Image (tube, rainbow, N blue to C red):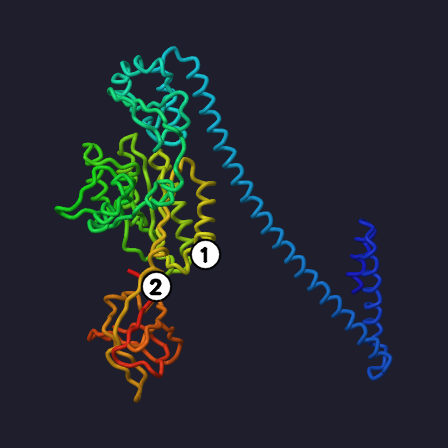
Amino acid sequence: YALDAVAFYGYYRKYRKSLALVIASLLMVLAQSAYLFNFSSLWGIIWWGWHGAKMMFYLGVMITVSVGFLLALNTIERSRHVLVRANRRLHRTQRRIRNVNQELRIRNRMAREAMTSPDLNNALDVVSNAVNQLLGIPCGELVLSIPADEVDEFERRMPHMRSHWPIRAKALNATCFGHTCQLVRESGGSYYECSSGTVDQSDADANPLDPRFGFLPRCTSRHETETAGRLGYAASQLVLSGPAKFWPGGFQPGRVHTFFCDSLLELRSITDQIRRGSLIAEYLGATLRLAGTESRFGIPVSAPAGLAGLCSLLADLPASQKIGLEFRADGSQIGIERWSQSGRQFLKLAREIGSRIGRPIACLGLGGNWYSEDWLFALKGAIAQWSGRAADEMFGVLDVLVDSGEAFSQPARCVITRVLEVRKEFVQEVVVDASIRELPRAAHFPHRVVWRSSNDLTWRSIRPGRATILGRLHLEADILARRVEIPDDLRAGDLLAFRDVTD
């Protein structure tokens, strides 16, 4: 006690902290008490009272110091989290500033060189190079505004120019170049001008296939591709994915919107078709099989050989070909949190692939296979957060393809089945003439069930209970629903309907 008191007094003399002087004084009192202990009566009430007060003071000091230490640690931890978030925001802001500065440098160089260029050919070279640096897209996206009195001269030069740049043109006073532009004449290249520039909203509302809605059909087999064609979709709107896109003798589109290859062998084959001109795809790339996603789709890039082979093939694609990547993870099965982790892993891998091949990734695909109940939560939460992260970290992304899974079709599908037998003697079971062939995810997804009596046309809900609905197949796994209640007046011949049916 005496030595500690001297130390605290020295601290007081040096830094003039009043608290140190108070502690030094208390320690001297405790030192005196300890010294006089040998000369006092052990059973004296006064002594034991003073000794108890001393111990309480000692314990109070220790508790105060411990609580203060814990509070200080908590404050330090909160400050650390605040600093981490601030550093992350600063890092994103710095990356945005760096991208903006790079874009401004390219734009300024393009404007300076294009304005000082002596002829149109050099100007087109400058502009196409700048566009490639900015977005990684071919100069075929260039649209020239041509005055009406220069159309004939432009058309005479068009064959030579198109041999270097696949350019297009529109009238100088046109307001757009899109679905409302009309072809005026064609000679080597095409000359367009816009019509009225207005769109009949009633036509757009009546046509769900209108491109402005942003819906593209994702096709994974010949049957789906042909069905999309019968529904009115053009081949240039198709997004082809999965391991069985083309079957022998089936529909072979010559131009598609996006082609995601499922293997390195398929990517080599499609690259050859791209080079020969037998297939044109706005985006060509691959589906990535991420580590830990338990997916059977895509190229296993978790293996170094798979990632190296993919980068090698993508790097060999023509410079005018835009590249896309996608990943698939069953969001409604693994949960939104694990899907978000897979999305962050995919984004990191896409950046690495783009860095390896030296070209930007222009299209990103998100596969989720969402159920209708999960879709809005994912769209407003995990998908929105992922999109913001992609906008911050990926430079040159033009399109993001979000697979809604069965979110739109699931509420519109049901399986209607007939009751074959109602068992209530020892166990509560209902046997129907449907099976897990019609309800393949019955074990994972609890379908809502309604029933209708043969004497009544009203559909009524079946509430939770202790009964089981069995399918018609001679299989142990053919159980369509568990823990449901059997209505008292349910009879053989009545109808059951399983709602929200999935593929």
- The count of marks equals 2
Please report whichever mark, 1 or 2, sits nearer to the chain's N-terminal start: 1
**Where residue 160 sits: x, y (%)?**
26, 16
Residue at x 37%, y 35% (from the top left corner)? 360
Residue at x 30%, y 38% (from the top left corner)? 283
**Where residue 260 sits: x, y (%)?**
28, 44
- Mark 2 residue type: Asp
Q: Is residue 100 found left or right of 250 in the rendered image?
A: right
Q: Choose top left, top right, bottom left or bottom right for residue 478.
A: bottom left
Residue 476 or residue 268, whichever sits in front:
476
- Mark 1 residue type: Phe
Residue found at the very far bottom of the displayed protein:
425
Q: Choose top left, top right, bottom left or bottom right for residue 164.
A: top left
Residue at x 84%, y 67% (from the top left corner)? 29
Q: Distance of mark 1 from mark 2, alpha carbons?
A: 18 Å
State the residue position of label 2.
Answer: 500
Numbered mark located on residue 377 in the image: 1
Dot 2 falls on a residue whose secondary structure is loop
Numbered mark located on residue 87 in the image: none
**Where residue 398 sits: x, y (%)?**
39, 37
Residue at x 37%, y 21% (from the top left corner)? 171
